[in-house]
Amino acid sequence: MRRIRFFTVAVLLGLLASASFTASASWQGTWYYYDEEGALVGSWTAGCGDADGRWGETTDNRVFIQGCRSES
């Protein structure tokens, strides 16, 4: 009975860790904000380390690009 309980706890902790990693990875990316005419007026990058930050203004007209850009 003790082995089954230990195995169950280990599996649950593994699932929790993988779900946490997946949730954090899905929020790595950049929001791009556009004005009514379609001109880029701001952006917000999150989850990408040194590239994180904001500039410009935020609007309701926005697009989310998932993932972090590689520096080239």
Image (cartoon, rainbow, N blue to C red):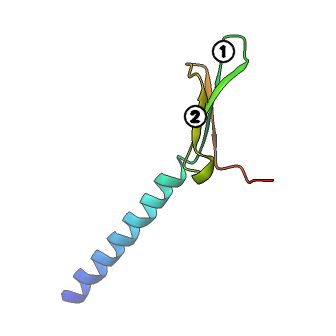
- Say what amino acid the circle numbered 2 marks: Arg
Relative side of 6 to 11, left or right: left
Residue furthest to the top in view is 36
Q: Quadrant of residue 19?
A: bottom left
- Say what amino acid the circle numbered 1 marks: Asp
Residue 21, image x, y percentages: 48, 60
Mark nearer the N terminus (1 vs 2)? 1
Residue 51, image x, y percentages: 63, 47
The one of 54 and 62 positioned closer to us in this rendering = 54
Residue for badge 2:
54
Give the residue displayed 33% in from the left and 70% down from the top.
12
Residue 47, image x, y percentages: 54, 49
**Residue 28 against residue 63 in the figure, above or below:** below
Q: Quadrant of residue 15?
A: bottom left
Q: Nearer the viewer, mark 1 or mark 2?
A: 2
SS of the residue under disc 1: loop
Residue furthest to the right in view is 72
Residue for badge 1:
35
Relative side of 26 to 12, left or right: right
The quadrant in which the N terminus is found is bottom left
Question: Which mark, residue 22?
Answer: none
Determine the CA span between mark 1 and mark 2. 16 Å
